[in-house]
Amino acid sequence: MDTQPEVFDTAAHVSCEPCEGVFIVIPAFNEAPAIGAVLSELRTAYPNIVVVDDGSTDGTAQVARTAAAYVLRHAINCGQGAALQTGIEFALQRGAEYIVTFDADGQHRVEDVAALLAPIRSGECDIALGSRFLGQSVGVPPLRRVVLRFGVLFTRLVSRVNLTDAHNGLRAFSRRAAQRINLRLDRMAHATELIDQVRQSGLRFKEVPVQIRYTAYSLRKGQSARGAIRIVLHYLLGRVLQ
Amino acid sequence: MNLFQILAVAAVTGLFCLSLAAMLRGWATRREGLAWAVVWLATGLAILLPDLTTVVAKSLGIHRGADLVLYCTVIVMLVGFFMVYARLRRLRRDVTLLTRHLAIREAAPTSPTQPPPGSPPPANGSQT
């Protein structure tokens, strides 16, 4: 039962509609060197930024406090999935109409946020997932490409959803969609878990082409091939045990 | 009775008494105390009367008593690992929920940008 998401045209929708109801959720673990630039770029367009500091030890929270509207701090490190869920719940409590998740390491472009929001605002879908492989995929390093392909294949096998990029941190949710999502896998396996929940809840989703800025920093913080194997094991154990 | 049997039986007897004492003093529940007492009793019997395990093994279609003991040990350990792992995961999830609750409750707008007008008042930490 494959669901094939349609391709969405980015260029037509870059202009920003009212951004007050948009909450940007940024999970961050030891991202002090990068998060300042990310926040100062984002806040020009989006006032409601929620940084979830996931127990960082490098002053990420202090940096974030100078530029983000809300800084939430996990007292201990719980993992990216947990941080996302915390930020989403907080944004919902603050009356968010749209929630966008955004990585703290500077790999996403601010202009892609509007492109993700456009199909949700028009009622075309409930969840928009960023994909670096739709449209032009620029500068994806070869090994990273292989690892991500495996991620896509794995998601296709276990979730039976056909995506081009299952592990992109840039995603947008309508309020209704965000309320139905409950990430329980703390660490990186949440990406596949999210797709499972999207499929089971019957929410409409769509992939939107986005570009990833690969820098030496974001590559170092990204998933290695070994990390990917760990994620798969974690996800499978989670399916068995929960 | 060889030296190993003397030492092992002494140790096992001590542990047997300890589990009973733990149960009586309320350090362990009745069920836990009894379960451990039975384990130590069986261990002591197997050490004192090795032929007994062989009799039981034969009745199960295993040739040697030592093999029976080995199989039982492996099964018990694996089940034990799995139970501990499942419990760790539950604990981990509870810790995450607690951490999330605290993070949301203590979130203050530390705000260089003011919250937009017309946004709902700050949640007062009550979880829904």
Image: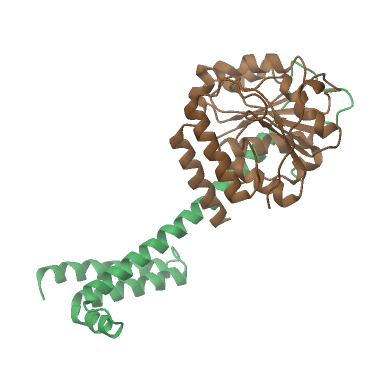
Chain colours: A brown, B green
How far across and down, in percent of the image, does residue A7 sit?
74, 33
Quadrant (top left/top right/bottom left/bottom right) for the C terminus of chain A: bottom right
Reply above or below: A5 against B80. Answer: above
Q: Which image quarter: residue A127?
A: top right
Q: Nearer the viewer, residue A37 or B40?
A: A37
Q: Is residue B2 left or right of residue B34?
A: left
Q: Where is residue A91, by image quadrant? A: top right
Q: Is residue B123 visible?
A: no
**Quarter-of-image position of residue A188:** top right
* Residue at 82% in and 20% down: A16
Q: Is residue A46 left or right of residue A237?
A: right
Q: Residue A72 at x, y = what percent?
A: 66, 29
Which residue is at 61% across, 23% downward? A212
Residue B112 sits above or below residue B6 on the image: above
Residue A193, x across and y down, in percent: 62, 45
Asked whether residue A15 is in view, the answer is: yes
Rendered view: A103 above or below A158: above
Residue A214 appears left or right of A48: left
